[in-house]
Structure formats: structure tokens, C-alpha cells
Image (spheres, helix red, strand yellow):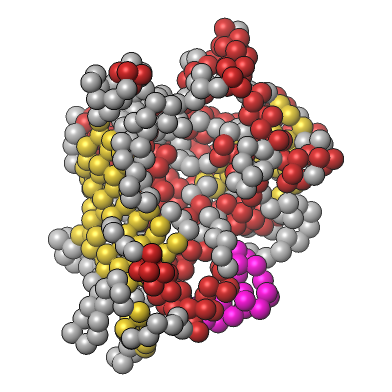
Amino acid sequence: MDITPEQTELGKDNFNEAVGVTRRSMLKTAAAGGVGLGALYFNYEKLNGKPVRAAFIGCGDEANVLMTEHPADYMELVAIADPRPANIERSFTGSHPEARIGLNKKLGQARASEVKVYPSHRELLQDAESLGLEMVVIAVPLSQHAPIALECLEAGLHVLTEKLMAHNITECKQMIRKAAEKGLLLAVGHQRHYSVLYDNANSLIQQSLLGDIKFIRAQWHRNNSFPGRDSWKKWGRSAESRKDEAHLTKLEKDGYLKELGYDSARQLVDWRLYNKTGGGLMAELGSHQMDAASIFLGKVHPVAVQGYGGRNFYGVEGVGPEENWADDRDIDDHIYVTLEFPGRSYEKDQDDIAIVTYSSINTNRLEFYGETVFGSRGTLIMKEEKEALLYKEESPGSGGGLEQRLHVIDSVAGGGPVLDSYNTSAASAGSALAKGAVGDKISRGYREEMEHFCYCVRNGRPNSELRCNGTVAMADAIMALTANLAMKHKKRIEFKDEWFDPSSDAVPETDEQVTG
């Protein structure tokens, strides 16, 4: 979508205007500094008691983002585990000045030196009692989410695992049942559930400011067509990497990696490129968009999915640089998916459908990643988890479009707030209030999800209070993994209610409409 810088600023002002009016009392409290934004929006409090003692299992890029964001006043990091020496080293020294600053800077070198280091989660779990562990954060390759989570739950530890929840839905249900059996908390890091930006956006949607939503377009486009550009292909890329790989190759020959669930050292390093260890573009990227779409549509379950996925660039002779011809990845490099969701009147009229499209490609990244929500009264653009832009639809009574400022008025029929337009070049007081409360630094929700998880651990709260508990996260996994099945088998697959029920053994991967 071609939007000028001026139109972008106008869209941001419009969004802040709508939030400032509809959530005025909450924002005034936040602006006054009475409570942190996370606690205010997501209903948790300052921790009453000692921080929860936690360990990180897996120390790659995503884990290091979480370590940087981890709330030290809620969580005491006591140990980390990873078979890769380079990952352990980067966890302390850092690899990015803001996103991954390292434990030495985060905690101070004296405190960081007290963090115990383990080459595997099993050795860490052997010391769980002496460490006084209460919870773990799991950030390992997708195929190992469930096996490691089940071991940790069996050991009596609360589990916060990275998304996608598991490699298949059978594993998701095993995790939910084990957590219930042990009376432990289980959450999954779909951070949009704890993003203030997304919470404000969803508040506007649920108040029907956008009108009736029939279409959401989502995408995450990248361009990996240049040699060495693919960030998921790390094997042999640097001297540091090769040093680490020599160590892993020895572990492979010793059979140690096989015990941890990997066929080879390269499969561990480049795990996102293989279906055995990862879930492809849909699991790693598309799950974020499907999660957001589901939230915006009222957390309803989809009706059906179909799509196309293929290796349209990598491994196709004559398309790209020579290195791509011999690329042995087995995940798709282009995917296009259409999901059908129930509309507001679906129970009465099954023709009432809302469509969500998703695309992820590896050969062009002109457009930003995010979601565009098309409503009958307005359009909402969520841009890279950092910005939200709002534009009004032109109506018989007032203007609209990319050039028009809007304001919010109460419906004369008493049906809630509605959008109107006005001609002025200045942002309103409501817009300033919303911007001032949130500030310029947009949180992506990592800190808030960990704060709330620790709050629930310390206060003995139930799984149902977690915004992305096992049942919620399983629904996200069902959407992503069933989309993969639809692309693989070239079928339109209808979702079944029992798939979303943790007590049922029915799952999409063994359903007759998929396998038949």
C-alpha cells in the first residue's frame, strides 16, 4: 500500500485520537504514573514476594531478546542451558546494542557471573532442586518444544515456551494435559497478547469503530535472493560459526545430539529450514499474523483453510545464484494462504464469512510486515508491531480516506462510539493523551508476558488467567499447522471443534479429510 509520510503521520494521529477518546480514564492513570502500562492493561500487580527463580533453555537469538527484556523485579535468572558454546557466550556478551544486550550488561558482570551454565536441559533439570528453580523459559527449535516442556512439567516446573506451541497438535494436547495433571502454569510466547499497541487496536475493533470486518490482509515478505542473505541459513557463514560447528560435529559423532532430538549438527544450526525440526514460514512468521487476525475477529476459530506453498526459488535451477540450485532445505520459500472465519451472524447465516489472507515470500520485501484490517467504517493498518494507522471510510455524511483527520463521537442511537471527520491540521488533545501515555518506545509484549507469568506463578493464579495459555496457544498452532497441511495436500480443509478441545484426541494431522 503506497502511503506518504504525511499520510502515515495522519494515520498515527487518527489512531491515537480514537484510543485517547475511548480509553481516556485508563490513559490518564498511566500518564500520571500510577501504574505501569503492562500492569494497567493486563491486570497484574507489582510482585508481592521474591522474584520467581527461572532458567532459560535455549540461548539463540529469540532467547537473547527475552533475556534482554526479562523483568528482573519479577524474575530472577539463575541458569541457562544450550549445547552451542557460541550461544552461551553471546548470552553474556550480547549481539545487538538494544535487542540483545547480553547478561553482563543486563545484570551487571558480578550478578551475571552467578548464572549457572549447562550444556543440556537434562543436566539443568538434575540440579533444579539445588537451584531452587520454579519456572523455565523454553526457546529451542520447534520440534523440541513439547519434549522439553513435558520433561520440565514432570519435574514440577512452570513452563513459558516460545511459539509455535509444538510441532503437532497431539503434542499440544499432551502439554496441556500434563500441566493440568501437575497443577502447573503453561503459557506460550505469542507476544501480541501482551502488546499494548495491539490491545488498543483490538479495543477499537471490539467497539465496532471499524464497522463490519470482512477482510484482513496479512503478510511477512522478505528478500533472501541474494547470496548469504537468508538469516535462517547460518551453517558455515562465519569463522565464529565454523568454530561452534566443529564442537557440534563432535557432539554429533558422539551421538549426543541424537539424544537431544537432532539428526545432525547442521540440522540443529539451520533448524528452521527443515520440516523435521521446524514448521516453515507459516509456523515461524505466519502464526503471528493468524494470531493477530484471530484476536481482531473475537478469538473465534476459523471455518476452513486452503492455500499454495512451494519451493519457487531455492533449488530451482536457473532462477537464482548458483548456491540456491543446490540448497537442500525442504520448507517452502513462498506461501499463500486463505482462511475463512465466521462473521458476526455466522450461526444464523453460514454465508457470513470474513476472509484472512496471508503471504510470505523470499524474493521481495517492498511492503512492511503486518496486518491491514478492512472494515465497513474504517481501515486499520498494523505496521511491524511498532505503529498503528487508522483511516475513516468516506460516508454520505462525512469525508474519509488517507488525507482526512478523524475524531470519535457518541452514536446518537446510543450504540457506542463512531468515527467522524473534520478539517484541521492539528492533532487533538485525545491524540496527545494516548501518545503521551504510551510514549515513543513501543513494547512488543515480551516483558509484559513474562511479568504476568511470574505474577501468576507467585500468586497461585490459574492457567485460565494467562492471556496465551495452552488452550489459546493450541488454537494458534492449529491454524498454522493445518494451513501447512492444506498446502502440502493441496486441499481445502475444514476445521473441527474437537481439534480445539484439549480433552479430545482428535487432531488435524490424523483427520481423514487430510489423510484420505
Farthest-out residue, bottom: 412
Residue 28 falls within the magenta-colored stretch: yes
Q: Is 403 placed above or below 316 here? A: below
What are the residue bounds of the magenta stretch?
19-40
Residue 130 lies, in percent from the top left, at 80, 34
Q: Is residue 207 left or right of residue 118?
A: left
- The residue lying at 69 percent from left, 29 percent from top is 89
Q: How many marks?
A: 0
Work out whether 273 lies above or below 336: above
Residue 126 locus on image (x, y percent): 72, 27
- Residue at 55% x, 82% y is 25
Image quadrant in which the N terminus is located: bottom left
Outermost residue toward the top in this view: 253
Q: Residue at x 31, y 78 (%)?
A: 404
Q: Is residue 2 left or right of residue 179?
A: left
Q: Is residue 277 above or below residue 191?
A: above
Question: x%, y% of residue 342?
Answer: 25, 59
Q: Which of the 4 quarters of the picture holds residue 319? A: top left
For the stretch drawn in magenta, the main secondary structure is helix
Residue 267, given in percent of the width and then of the height, sits at: 47, 20
Q: Work out whether 222 lies above or below 12.
A: above
Q: Quadrant of the C terminus?
A: top left
Asked if the stretch drawn in magenta spans residue 373, the answer is no
The one nearer the camera, 464 or 342, is 342
Q: Quadrant of residue 173?
A: top left
Residue at 85% over, 40% down: 110
Whether residue 107 sits left or right of residue 383 in the image: it is: right
